Amino acid sequence: MKNLILILFVFILTLEVHSQNDKILEIGEELNYSVYYGFIKLGEVKFKITGRDKEGKNDVFTTTASIKSFEAIPLVNINYIFESQMHYEKGEVHSIKFTATEFKEKSITNVYYTFDYDDKMIRTLKEVDGRESVKQDFNMDIEKNFQDGLSLMYNARLQSMQNKTKNSNNRFNVPVYINEKESSVRYSYNFTPEEVEVDMLNYGAKCIKVAGIADFVGVFGLTGEFAGWFSDDDYRVPLKAKFNVTIGSITLELESFKKKGWKAPAFNK
């Protein structure tokens, strides 16, 4: 009888975890953000979960993102497309393949990362206008799972569901492979609800905060301290984020979305 109760408990717990993860990693989810420098609208960022496949017993999710600045903005010319294939396991994801394409006025640069965890190698290929520019293998010194510049966001959303009490250890030091080298990002969560306002809502949203430090230099010089606010529900939708880039501090704000059954939770004072 005790064994039966234990089995039922594990089964119910597994269903709850999968339900939460399906809400975060929903196929077809689209999140569209405006990028602001003060009151100036610099451009837009779009995220989408495009696919889900099986690799053995585990799921592999495919996500894409585009970052584009507006042509009318002087001294800012950004046009990227990213794709990440993420291996889901035990309530987290990690990168297995990553592609970045940068469009410049007269050239196109493609970067490909393949994470070979069996051989403990990260294989890198960089091409400029179809010609090989960099080809190298990076040796993983110890066994660990890496994030790329795109999978980071989805992993942070999932991790926020693992530690939801004030007394839990919610500090993370996450290995990242970016700019053809190993780096890391450190962050933690504050589960005390905060009110966050975005233009798309006519009310204040109830959110939790994630804050940390990026040890790498990303797109447009993104580095150092950052903060983000996820919806305080099972969907963990990012509503707003602040980053340090080349020109100073910028803000990302959710402008539109496609997500089944989701409505930003209201903050009740």
Image: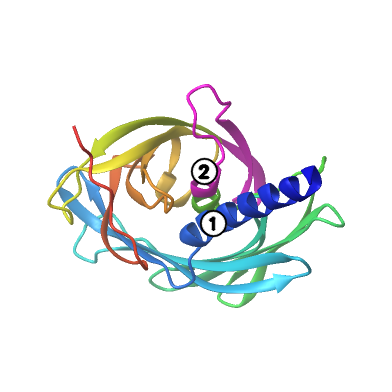
Residue at the spot x=74%, y=45% of the render?
A: 6
Q: Amino acid at mark 1?
A: Asn
Q: Find the residue positioned furthest to the bottom.
A: 130
Q: CA distance from mark 2 to mark 1?
A: 9 Å
Vertical side of 266 occupied by 127: above or below: below
Dots 2 and 1: beta carbons under 8 Å?
A: yes
Could you tell me residue 230's position as x and y percent? 38, 45
Q: Which quadrant holds residue 182?
A: top right
Could you tell me residue 231's position as x and y percent? 35, 46
Report which residue position mark 2 lands on.
Answer: 161
* Chain-order first, disc 2 or disc 1: 1
Report which residue position mark 1 lands on.
Answer: 21
* Label 2 packing within 10 angstroms: few (<14), some (14-19), many (20+): some
Q: Amino acid at mark 2?
A: Met
Residue at the spot x=47%, y=60% of the render?
A: 23
| Residue 259 shown in magenta | no
Q: Is residue 126 visible?
A: no
Q: Which residues are magenta?
A: 156-185
Residue at the spot x=16%, y=50% of the render?
A: 40
Indicate the secondary structure of the residue bearing disc 2: loop
Is 131 on the left-hand or right-hand side of 149?
right
| Residue 166 shown in magenta | yes
Indicate the secondary structure of the residue bearing disc 1: helix
Q: Find the residue positioned furthest to the right.
A: 119
